[in-house]
Amino acid sequence: MNLNLTTKKIDSDVEIIIVRNKKIKENKEILEVLKFTGKDEEVVLLPESKKIYVGCESSDEDNIRIAIANAVKKLNTTNYKSASIKCKDKLSAYIDGFELGNYSFDKYKSKDEKDISEDKNIYIEVEEITKDIQNVFEQSVAICTSVNMVRDFVNTAPDDFYPSVMAQEAIKIATNNNLECKILDEEYLEQNGMGAMLAVGRASRYRSKLIHLTYKPSGKKKTKKKIVLVGKGLTYDSGGLSLKPSDFMVSMKSDKSGGSAVLGIMNAISSLNLPIEVHGIVGAVENMIGGDAYKPDDILKAKNGTTIEVRNTDAEGRLVLADCLCYAQDEIEEIDGIFDFATLTGACVVGVGQYTSGIMGNNEKLNNEFIKTSLKSGELACMLPFNRYLKKTLKSEIADICNISNTRYGGAITAGMFLENFIKDEYKQKWVHVDIAGPAFVESDWGYNPHGASGAGVRMTLEYLKSL
Ligand code: BES
Ligand code: ZN
Ligand code: ZN
């Protein structure tokens, strides 16, 4: 699918009409017969008048995105090669709807089932193509392209996407966007005392990788802020020796979603031309079983010297993140914000549902700012508050801390509070943990998100970075 901006009326095969606030202006009779009233999610194709009508009950941006996505899906059931649509406002929501709604994952489909939308042209008719409009167009396309890239990463089967593949993808992103790129291997982890991350990957036939990408604004632009993004890149999570039950193991290729989101953000960032320095750090690891596996009862030592009693090898993401967070704070000076992204707990999904990310940290104001920009971008997020009582449930009798809490309740929060042990005092108020376990991967389509990976984390973070 090719998106084009135009000021001319294009004689396309079909026209897409968004009916906002149920105001139907033409074809009233036939639409009534077809029971189209302009409600959200309603979509009708009138082949004779060459029109696709979609309902959009409000002019809210997410409503527009969903309406457009529904129109694209309808268009893709036809052989029409071109479509046009008028756009008076909220251009970026239109583009999101097209680019995100049109996504399909066909990597493993045989040829004849492949995407039919590849050769379609979409013309978005605007009144004037100002510099601003052109900018919005280019930036929105860049962001959506990165979201779709993340979706591809996450949907890819675990034996086609393991830590060194993730590292190769990071190198490609760095090359295409002029980023600095460091790939650190297990020897580095060992030499630098990163015993927690190292343990998790021990039973895998794939070697763990720590990926570090850096974006620095070009030219003389003064760097305002320095932001660090850290992602959980578990290319597969079998649970380890605390093995997951079969039904829970299915879809655990999605445990690389946080790391993939960080790569996606780094991919989009240079197109946005932001005056901030951004670091993307990913712990790419596979959690497997075997004679060499780390065990419940093991005591691990993280990079900051903290000793961790392993009581469950399925709580592995926090171990990987612990060392990655330490690495970030040791290697990068004077950080203004640290954000980590992880499919960290099933408890977060139970707590807030599969469409919403859980936002945690010590700084309520910062949490709320992040939530605000997330909602603006179209990603649902809400705060899960820390408290002193849950913090105590992570105590260990023989080490500094346990990797799981001693209570069944509040699992998303206790996981977040585990991570807090690896944040230095000076950064305690500058750190936000984002649990994307729900929205990162949903096994049915929702709005403009497809079955499978959604690319959660990318749009919310870019929106936040733009606001700085
Ligand atoms: N990757 C999982 C969390 C997860 C669950 C992500 C469902 C997406 C969907 C994580 O590593 C895990 O297994 N967490 C455990 C923690 C528990 C052992 C304290 C969980 O949530 O059950
Ligand atoms: Zn796990
Ligand atoms: Zn996991």
Image (spheres, helix red, strand yellow):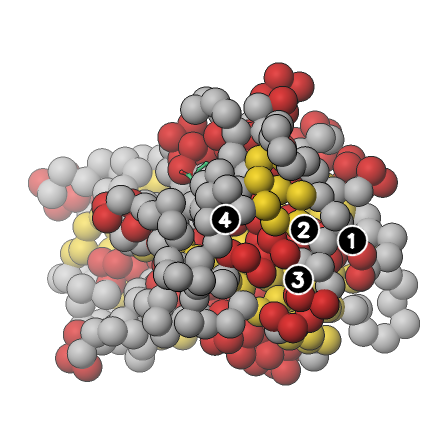
Who is closer to the viewer here, 107 or 92?
107
Mark 2 to mark 1 CA distance (whole Å): 13 Å
Rendered position, 242 above or below 286: above
Q: Is ligand 2 within 8 Å of the beta carbon of the residue shown at mark 4?
A: yes
* Residue at numbered disc 1: 329
Q: Residue at the spot x=71%, y=43% of the render? A: 306
Which is in the foreground here, disc 2 or disc 4?
2
Q: Residue at the spot x=57%, y=65% of the render? A: 263
Mark 2 to mark 3 CA distance (whole Å): 20 Å
Mark 3 surroundings within 10 Å by alpha-carbon count, few (fewer than 14), some (14 through 19), many (20 or more): many
**Callout 2 secondary element:** loop
Could you tell me the amino acid type at mark 3? Answer: Gly
* Residue at numbered disc 2: 302
Identify the mark nearer the N-term, 3 or 1: 3
Could you tell me the amino acid type at mark 1? Answer: Gln
How far from the left and from the top, in percent, is residue 437? Answer: 44, 44
Q: Tell me which corner region of the image, top left, top right, bottom left or bottom right, holds residue 242.
A: top left
Mark 4 surroundings within 10 Å by alpha-carbon count, few (fewer than 14), some (14 through 19), many (20 or more): many
**Callout 1 secondary element:** helix
